[in-house]
Structure formats: C-alpha cells, structure tokens
Amino acid sequence: MSKNDNISMLVIRRLPRYYRFLSELEEQHTERISSNKLAQIMNVTASQVRQDLNCFGGFGQQGYGYSVSQLKEEISNILGLNHGYKAILIGAGNFGTAVAKHLDFKKLGFELVGGFEIDREKFGETLGDIVIRDEAELESFCTENHVDAAFLCVPRQNVESTLERLYRLGIKCYWNFSHYDISAKYNDTVVENVHLSDNLMTLCYRMTNRGEQ
Amino acid sequence: MSKNDNISMLVIRRLPRYYRFLSELEEQHTERISSNKLAQIMNVTASQVRQDLNCFGGFGQQGYGYSVSQLKEEISNILGLNHGYKAILIGAGNFGTAVAKHLDFKKLGFELVGGFEIDREKFGETLGDIVIRDEAELESFCTENHVDAAFLCVPRQNVESTLERLYRLGIKCYWNFSHYDISAKYNDTVVENVHLSDNLMTLCYRMTNRGEQ
DNA sequence: TAGATTGTTAATCGATTAACAATC
DNA sequence: TAGATTGTTAATCGATTAACAATC
C-alpha cells in the first residue's frame, strides 16, 4: 500500500485531520478539491498537503485535483478504520462512561466488546452496546473473546496491576488516559496517551504568554 | 523571564511532561538530577533536556545538575500554573462531568467557578466545587464574575452559538473538546483542542501498521 | 585540584516550503 | 490546444544531537 515505509509520525498524526475535513466536504457534496483549496480550508500549505498525501501514493490527478470521496476512502484505508479492532473498556467511571457513550467507535476503527470495573455496584449495567463486568472476569472473558486493544480509563494507581494482567493475556495495544508510562515498562506495546492535564497546562502557558507570539 | 521570546511550540508542549516527571522525582525525595539522568527516565536525549531548559534561562549548576524542587518551581512559573485563571464549564454531560470531577484545576493553573447547561434537569446540581446553571444566565454570570476561559464540553452542533456569546462577553481562551474549528472563525483567541477521535484513529493506524517501524 | 555536568556553539538531521516539469 | 494542478525534486528552514569549553 505504501510507497515509503518510513513515514514520519508528524504526517501520521495529520491524517485524522485530513480525514475530518474530507468528511465535511463530502457532507457538503463537494466532489473534487485541489491541494490549494484544501490547504486553505485547513490552514496549512498546499505543498504540505501534496507531500503528505504522496507518502502513500498518488491519489490526485493533474489538472483536476483530488476526488473527495476517493481520497477520504484512501485515508480511511491507510488508517485502517475498516478493521473494527475489538476493544475493552477498563474503568466505567466518568471518563470511561463519557468515552463509551460519545465516541462512534465503528467509525474510528474499533468495536467495543466489553467493559470492566472493580466497583460491584456497576456490574451488569449497560453502557452503549456493552455490559459492565467484574474485573475478576477479565481473564475468562479475554480467553473466550478475541480482544485487540484496551481503553484504560482508570486512575493511575489502578492501572499498573490491571495492565500486567492485560499484557499477560496478550493485549498489547492501549489507549491510555492515565499518566502511567506504559511504554517505559513494556516496550513491545502500541500506546496512545491522552494527557488532558498536559493539554490544559499548555493552555495556561499560552494564556500567560499571550502577545509574546 | 525568558531569554528568548521565540520559543517553539514543540518545546512548550514538552514542558508539562518535564513538570510531571519532576513532580514524581520530588515525591520520591530526589533532591538533584542531571540532564543525563532525567533524559534517561524520560526517554529523550540529554541535549534536548538542556536545550529546552535553556530556552528559559540557566536553571542548573555545572558539576552538580539541577535542583529538582527549584526546577519544578521554575517550570511551574513558566507555565503560569500559579495564576488560577477563572474558568467556566460549558456542558455538564459525561465529558463535562468527567473533567470537572477528575482534574485538579488548582494544580493546572485554573479555578473552575461555574458550569452551564441547557438541560434544565441539571440546573442546581453541584459538580465538585461548582453549581450547574441555566445557560441563559451566561451573560449575567460573566458580567458579575470575571471569567478568563471556557471549557467547551458540548457536542459540536451546540458549540457555535454558545461560542459567539462567550466571545461577545470577552472570553477568548478555550479548551475545546468539540471538532468545531474555533481559530478559523476567531483569530484573536487562544485555543487548545482535545481531539479524542483523532487520537484513537492514530492508535488504529499504528495497530494496522505495526512492525513497519 | 579532579571530576562532573552545565550552557552554548557547531554539525547533523529531518520537515517544510518553493519551484517546476509532467500530465490530465 | 491552453489551463490547471499534480507529483516530485531542490532549497530553505527549523529542530535535534553532538561536542566541548566554561565552571561549579
């Protein structure tokens, strides 16, 4: 699929953004778009758009531009959004609930197949499509069901022990809301961290140093 | 405060991470640390640590290294974490609730002073330290109380109209959980976006293309 | 003093932008 | 054909890393 196997993480992290803007264009029934116009909408350079897309192949046509729906489909394939990776939710507190209720996992490449909690009050509750189970059942559930990834929505102090169990079960892809440094301990994992507090501190910096840039 | 007013956004986004690791070192009663050791813990180069810190001034001492507590304090000041910027929460749904309950705003440079909702069932509820109010009261509240920032935890379709009101009230700093492109419309704002779905798509890409790197 | 480690300059590496020939 | 716009190469810019003199 790819022309070049060494694609920068910077390019990859821009792909979802392209995908978002293309989805919007499609909703507005825009059929074709030039790198120039797309760059303008996204507030980047046309050069960057063309370079980024050409990491994966030539999806455009000289003199015409790009077909919105085709390009969207190509990026979807590059991201692998069609895989429907089976994921479990660890922790059905406020964050776990928010994530499970508001994200459309099907569109994001995943399928949420179960949720686990230590709080017995929540056992049996349903959250979107999933049922909340006793975390003690983690091993039996994962043995019976194929699970590709875990969404870690538990406080930091609870992550470590659960993570060890998940890792032992062969689950090595994590979406991590805690500050626990997974890759430091397990180096053969795939981890995306959501550091909300880092993000908020950055906002604080920018508010404090407004005008300087 | 700064030696150089043109500090790269890449450096700035690393500051919260330094702050986090320094906080941990302090908790473990580590008094001093060398750029080499810190780099090792954080999985970056010692050069980068020294270059980053030197954007803001010389906080170390040759032959000794850096004082953990002093360096942490310096970074806190650079980020402006002592400001206690007054913020309001827009939307007390699952995400708003999760954010309000689980983040320690005081430590992140903010003080949450109120919350707003359109769902009348939630009026009067308390969430951590704040009371949920009718969004109709936004103007009166913000006129009576000084508000520096808004945390936007409402679905995309509701952001636009509320944003216009906030902007008219002079609130121009936003923590945005929606996909609405604030800076495109209002260019004198400070915006930090939390794009959870972008993050999850990146995880999907990395799972799909595992082994290639 | 000798050893350690910074602050800083210089070298390298990578990412972005500009330019333009290829081509629809 | 003429105009538009890509794919791609070359030029520029910026970030990271290496090296080392300064100094605690």
Image (spheres, coloured by chain):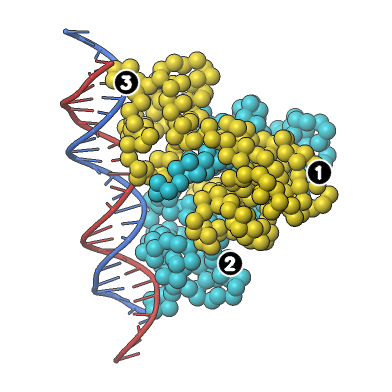
Chain colours: A cyan, B yellow, C blue, D red
The residue lying at 66 percent from left, 61 percent from top is B161
Q: Tell me the residue that label 3 is attached to.
A: B61
Tags 2 and 3 in contact by the CB under 8 Å rule?
no
| Amino acid type, residue under disc 3 in the picture | Gln
Residue B63: x and y in percent read 29, 17
* Same subunit, tags 1 and 3: yes
Answer whether residue A87 is visible to the viewer in this image: no
The residue lying at 60 percent from left, 32 percent from top is B106
Residue nearer the viewer, B115 or C9: B115
The image shows residue A42, relative to residue A163, as above or below, that is below
Q: In the rendered image, which quarter is residue B111 located in?
A: top right
Q: Tell me the residue that label 2 is attached to.
A: A24
The image shows residue A151, relative to residue A129, as above or below, that is above
Chain of the residue under the numbered disc 1 shown in the image: B
Crowding around mark 2 (Cα neighbors within 10 Å: few <14, some 14 to 19, many 20+) is: few
Tags 2 and 1 in contact by the CB under 8 Å rule?
no
| Amino acid type, residue under disc 1 in the picture | Gly
A109 with respect to B96 (left or right): left
Answer whether residue A11 is visible to the viewer in this image: yes
Crowding around mark 1 (Cα neighbors within 10 Å: few <14, some 14 to 19, many 20+) is: some
Res A137 label: none
The image shows residue A187, relative to residue A63, as above or below, that is above
Q: Tell me the residue that label 1 is attached to.
A: B124
Residue B46: x and y in percent read 34, 29
Q: Secondary structure at mark 2?
A: helix
Tags 1 and 3 in contact by the CB under 8 Å rule?
no
